[in-house]
Amino acid sequence: MIYTVTLNPAIDNIIKVSNKLVSGKNNRIIAKDTDVGGKGTHVSIALCLLKEPNICTGIAGQYGYEKLAKLLKKYFVTDQFQINPDKAIRQNYVITDTRGDSSYLISEYGSALTRKDVDNLFKNPLSKINEKDYVIVSGNPSLKTDIKDFSYFLKKLANTKAKIIADVSGKYLREMLKMKLFLIKPNEFEFAEIISETIQSTEGYYQAYLNHGDQLKNAKNLAISLGKKGSILICSKVAYFFETAKVHTVNDTGSGDAYLAGLIYGFANKLPVPQIGILANAIGAAKAEKECSSGFDNARVKKLAKQIIYRKIG
Ligand code: TA6
């Protein structure tokens, strides 16, 4: 079974303004919407769209949970969030414009993860995890979380012997890299932060992977999303670069999560590595064509997959 764990879910309030967002000017709102936020939730939505069974879990505040559950149901996701009666689900704001260059993400901190949350998580939705399962920790806990409490969560997770996938950043990714991981999926900035080096070329990513083996040794597979520049996938020391499909970007929020869902689908269904990369990139591109933070059109994925060019870089 595939589990997604969102430790700090959100409701995304999407605001569309005409032309480009400009400071010092009254930017008129031309459309508004709300959608699921919080990364792991997006991975579950994408897996459901791919008809891949999965369990959407994490810690959700009581206040706002009903709205989040209703939004998830829109994508046929039945969640198993552990509810914390003293917390509220945070509100994030995604600003897009009619130019489609990119989106602006403004997010609340949310509530710190506590040991009590962790104990409840493993007593309930995560109680049946075993070594055959995939567990995707996607999205950081609130930045107010003490790293010791996050590490308490990781220790319990490691004891399940599941295949662990990490889409977290900064100090939380450093902490997760202390344990055996099936896959990590930093973006280019998160990768540069971990290895304290900025990569100048596509081939430079493979060299950096070799040079920083000590920091990356616990990651069996490594995917690096490079936004519109494409992505890198390194499995069993073989590296590929994938160009992105050419799409008109409406809202790129959530594209990284959709891309990750494609990777997980590919690994879980034992596709050949190049096919995994092609599928993941096509899904990430198809998501960027959508107004909201989650969801994509499967027919578009099939079409975009045919466009994806890739090459071996190491
Ligand atoms: O990846 C997109 C997204 O999930 C947005 O929907 C927004 O909720 C944000 O990321 C949350 O990111 P964070 O790292 O704060 O959990």
Image: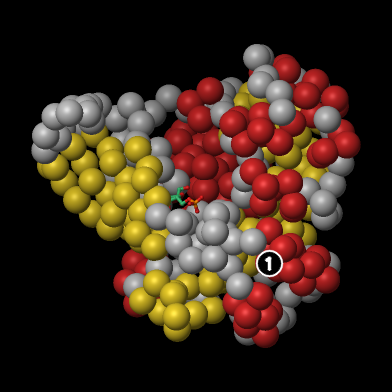
Quadrant (top left/top right/bottom left/bottom right) for the N terminus: bottom right
Q: Is residue 311 above or below residue 52?
A: above
Quadrant assignment, res 180: bottom right
Q: Which residue is mark 1?
A: 149
Query: Which residue is drawn at the image coordinates 74% and 58% (left, top)?
Result: 164
Instruction: Report whether 239 appears left or right of 236.
Output: left
Query: Which residue is drawn at the image coordinates 82% and 51% (left, top)?
Result: 178
Looking at the picture, how far across and down is residue 266, in whole percent? 66, 49
Quadrant assignment, res 252: top left
Instruction: Report whether 124 appears left or right of 154.
Output: left
Query: Which residue is drawn at the image coordinates 67% and 80% (left, top)?
Result: 119
Looking at the picture, how far across and down is residue 79, in whole percent? 49, 74
Residue extending farthest top: 200
Looking at the picture, how far across and down is residue 110, in whole percent? 45, 62
Q: Disc 1 residue type?
A: Asp
Mark 1 surroundings within 10 Å by alpha-carbon count, few (fewer than 14), some (14 through 19), many (20 or more): some
Looking at the picture, how far across and down is residue 239, in whole percent? 76, 28
Query: Which residue is drawn at the image coordinates 43% and 25% (left, top)?
Result: 246
> SS for tag 1?
helix
Q: Is residue 149 above or below residue 200?
A: below
Q: Nearer the viewer, residue 81 or 238?
A: 81
Q: Nearer the viewer, residue 305 or 98?
A: 98
Q: Is residue 69 visible?
A: no
Q: Is residue 111 above or below residue 121?
A: above
Q: Is residue 178 visible?
A: yes
Quadrant assignment, res 251: top left
Quadrant (top left/top right/bottom left/bottom right) for the C terminus: top right
